[in-house]
């Protein structure tokens, strides 16, 4: 038996956080897109 089989392998931290640490604009994909969209007034000037 190799010596490294007994050593615990590192694992990634859990992806799901508890609580509302992130603002809604980051957490929700529909709100994330808003910051990249131009408003109607800005598009009309171009």
Image: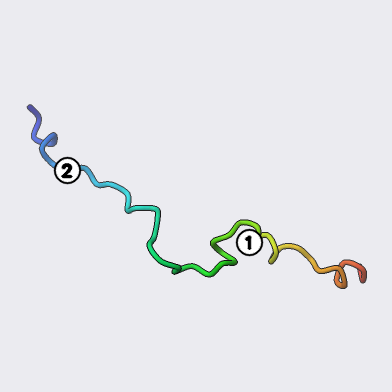
Q: Which residue is mark 2?
A: 8
Instruction: Name the residue tied to disc 1.
Output: 32
- How many residues crowd around disc 1 within 10 Å: few (fewer than 14), some, or many (20 or more)? few
Residue 43 vertical placement versus 7 (above, below)? below
Above-or-below relation of 28 to 5: below
Between the C-alphas of marks 1 and 2, the distance is 38 Å
Drawn side of residue 20 relative to residue 37, left or right:
left
Q: Quadrant of residue 2?
A: top left
Furthest residue toward front: 19
Task: Check the picture and name the quadrant holding the C terminus.
Answer: bottom right
> Tag 2, which secondary structure?
loop
Residue 32 in the image, given as x and y percentages of width and height: 63, 61
Instruction: Specify which label sits upstream in the sequence, 1 or 2.
Output: 2
Category of crowding for the residue at label 2, using alpha-carbon neighbours closer than 10 angstroms: few (below 14), some (14–19), many (at least 20)? few
**Left or right of 27, for residue 21:** left
Q: Residue at x 13, y 34 (%)?
A: 5
Q: Position of residue 38 (x, y in %)?
A: 79, 66
Identify the residue at horizontal 81%, vertical 69% (top origin): 39
């Amino acid at each position: 038996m190799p010596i490294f089989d007994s050593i615990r392998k590192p694992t990634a931290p859990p992806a799901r956080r508890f609580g509302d640490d992130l603002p809604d604009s980051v957490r929700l994909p529909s709100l994330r897109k808003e910051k990249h969209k131009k408003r109607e007034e800005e598009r009309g000037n171009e």
